[in-house]
Image: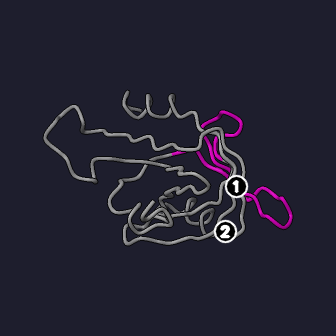
């Protein structure tokens, strides 16, 4: 793991539990999952990973990567849906599912069925390009 991404993950200190209120897929094979915050240690949180920042010559939103943005009572997470294992897991996310992000400090997110409380699955946090994700999400205008 390169030092920039390692630093991003090491410094990721958000702990959040939220209920899925909407799911949108963008044209880049990402799910934009909007959460109603149930519990969080931060009211505002938007860490960016900029792998090309040190080169200084790239300034597009492709060069900024993120996993989550928290704004008041809403949060947006971006989940890559390209690999087979991720597709299986992410296709099980539904409105009203519960997501817990880094609640145990292990830099992971876990998905729970709201009705049964059963763990559906989980993965390590990762980042995806920012692109226009905020503008087309539930956080638009916030």
Q: Which residue carries the number 1 mark?
A: 121
Q: CA distance from mark 2 to mark 1?
A: 9 Å
Crowd around label 1: few <14 · some 14–19 · many ≥20 (10 Å): some
Q: How many numbered callouts?
A: 2
Tell whether position 115 is magenta.
Answer: yes
| Element assignment for label 1 | strand
Quarter holding the N terminus is top left
Residue drawn 43% across and 28% down?
7
Residue in front for this viewpoint, 105 or 134 = 134
Residue drawn 27% across and 47% down?
63
- Seen in the picture, residue 119 relative to 47 is either above or below; the reply is below
| Residue 132 in the figure: left or right of residue 73 | left
Residue 14 placement (x, y as % from top left): 59, 38
Which label's residue is closer to the chain start, 2 or 1? 2
Residue drawn 17% across and 45% down?
58
Crowd around label 2: few <14 · some 14–19 · many ≥20 (10 Å): some
Residue drawn 77% across and 63% down?
113
| Residue 92 in the figure: left or right of residue 34 | right
Label 2 close to label 1 by CB (< 8 Å): yes
Which residues are the magenta region?
A: 101-125
Residue in front for this viewpoint, 81 or 79 = 79
Residue 104 placement (x, y as % from top left): 71, 36
Within the image, what quadrant is residue 90 found in?
bottom right
Q: Which residue carries the number 2 mark?
A: 92
| Residue 61 in the figure: left or right of residue 140 | left
Residue in front for this viewpoint, 79 or 96 = 96
**Which residue reaches farthest right?**
116
Residue 73 placement (x, y as % from top left): 62, 55
């Amino acid at each position: 793991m390169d030092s920039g991404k390692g630093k991003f993950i090491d410094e990721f200190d958000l702990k959040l539990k939220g209920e899925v209120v909407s799911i949108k897929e963008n044209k880049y094979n990402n799910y934009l999952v909007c959460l109603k915050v149930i519990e969080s240690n931060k009211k505002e949180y938007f860490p960016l990973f900029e792998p090309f920042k040190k080169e200084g010559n790239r300034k597009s939103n492709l060069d900024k990567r993120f996993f989550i943005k928290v704004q008041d009572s809403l949060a947006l997470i971006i989940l890559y849906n390209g690999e087979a294992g991720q597709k299986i897991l992410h296709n099980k996310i539904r409105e009203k599912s519960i997501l817990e992000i880094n609640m145990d400090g292990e830099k992971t997110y876990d998905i729970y069925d709201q009705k049964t409380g059963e763990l559906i699955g989980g993965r390590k946090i990762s980042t995806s390009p920012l692109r226009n994700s905020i503008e087309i999400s539930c956080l638009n205008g916030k």
